Amino acid sequence: MAQTLAEKIIAKAAGADSVSPGEIVTCKVDLAMIHDSAGPRQAGLKLDELGVPIWDLDKLVMITDHYINDDDPGHQEIQTHAHEWVRAHGIKNFINEQGICHIVLAESGHVKPGMFIVGGDSHSVTGGAFGTFMVGIGATEMTGVMATGEIWVRVPETVKIDVTGTLKPGVAAKDVILKLCGDHGIMGFNYQALEYSGTAVSAMSVEERMTLANMAAELGAKAGYCVPDEKTKAALEKWGSKGVEIDPWQSDADAAFAKTVTVDGAALSPQVAAPSSPENAAPVGDHAGTKLDQAYLGACTGAKLDDLHMAAEVLKGRKVQSGFKFMVSPSSLSMQEAARADGTLSIIEDAGGVILPMGCSGCIGIGPSRLEENAVGISSTNRNFVGRAGPKSSKLFLASPYTVAASAIKGAIADPREFL
Amino acid sequence: MNIIKGNAWTYGANIDTDALSPIGSYQGMGNLAAGAVHCMRDIDPNFSKSVKEGDVFVATDNLGIGSSRETAPLFLKTLGIRAVVAKSFARIFYRNCFNIGLPALVCPDAADIKMGDQLHVDASSGEIVNETQGTTYRCQPVPDHLMGIVDAGGLMPFLEKKLAKSA
């Protein structure tokens, strides 16, 4: 039976020859990821209540990224407990303060195409960029996975997202995904799996594909993935993954997709999502000139090395508006170091940007980039719900790293294409 | 399981996890009672103060969009909410509800329920009687594979039984 990649991975994890959309199956998990917010202090405590060991220590990765790099006593309490829990359970794969989990997991050498992966965070779908089927789950569900290594899944329909043509200069994966949010709504693909394909996706770097996969969450999708290719293999092998195969993990030519949605990549312009939902996306021109108080480049979505390069391309030789707050928190330590080594961070700093410690903070309203009362910001993150990045009175626009950097220069929402 | 009897707290579409569980409301190792006070504060500051044991949380489309944070349904449960009814749910929130022992019912007529209506919710049959309006709503049946978790009172008691059996 012809299968989509999502169906192939679920079938393998369920020990079945094939699966069909709507079917409920129990899958064996190839890899599980937890972090300091929902991991030890929630799922971990519940596992201790059950009093059973972790099903397979080789298949669990624990990453600290949410409550790091600050001196808040509550956050330090979380870290102290996390470290104790990691020791007590003999966690083999513990990655401490190296960056945001969705990036660091890929960099950890544990990910391979064809894997069925769960993560205790809604943006776990990011792992789909590497031809995995990766879903986000809650804490108690993670307890179940840690105890049994299994989880139930309703096999999703697969939707093909065909991004045609070549993206124009100044247009990035973030614009593709915001366009999809604008066209289809924040729950446009509820329960479905998205297969991102087309010439524009093939041309993307794996980091750009991570942006597409990451924001499958903002389309309501269960998972969003790119079929693996030579770029996938090269990136994963560079990060230490062994035995990466790409040929078995392609959708069959005659696989049944629920539908195909096309994004005209060549015609796409930079997008901006207005407060307070990613689905309020529109071409940047609709908001150009809107006054801003700050700009933030950060999160798993928008401060990877490629994202930092995009911002630097716009900022090189320019200055951000005098007195304007422009903050950058790289997605991972290795990417921060690479951006330091290749001069990218210097360009950002010379333009007036401030480099903050890496971590999730700004995206979830913690730390120096938290929006103040009534403040208006623009950011390269993935969500702008009321209260997410600041108090109820604050407002947040979402955009690509290009657009965030251009807006920092003007102190107002700006089209990056005039700087490229 | 028993019939849940309580008053409806009705809201609209896209009630997200930042509304249900605002950033910073679950401090340190976490205190549910202290955190639950903040539940829905940006939409209805009265909610957490006035909700009563047995009440039912009702929304229209996409209830629980956003984060995987389980405190979103846990705060509702902590405040006394015993069933969650919506026209449609975000998938992680939907699973989280069952996992923490809070039945989540998909009800096409959810928008007809008014704030304060007295409801009798039968999660097992998927029937909701609106005593105030004198109407009955048929919800989508809870999928068979979830009924075991509903009957056990959540995934934790379900796992305890399952692990005890296999031991």
Image (spheres, helix red, strand yellow):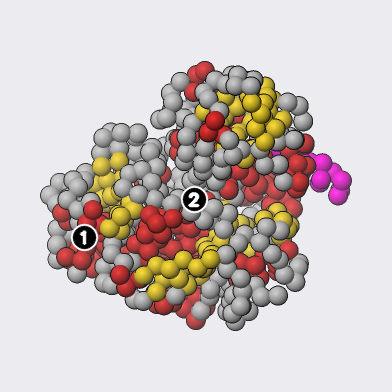
In space, the residues marked 2 and 1 are separated at their CA atoms by 28 Å
Residue A137: which disc? none
Between B56 and A30, the one lying in front of the other is B56
Q: Residue at x 54, y 53 (%)?
A: A190
Q: Sequence order check: which comes first, mark 2 or mark 1? A: 2
Q: Which amino acid does label 2 sit on?
A: Met
| Horizontal relation, residue A15 to residue B136: left or right | right
Name the residue tied to disc 1: A415
**Residue B73 in view, yes or no:** no
Q: In which quarter of the image is the C terminus of chain A?
A: bottom left
Q: Does the magenta stretch include residue A292?
A: no
Q: Residue B47 location, x and y as percent?
A: 49, 23
Is B162 left or right of A223, judged from the image as shown? right
Where A165 sits versus A47, above or below? below
- Residue matched to label 2: A187
What range of the chain is rendered magenta? B154-167
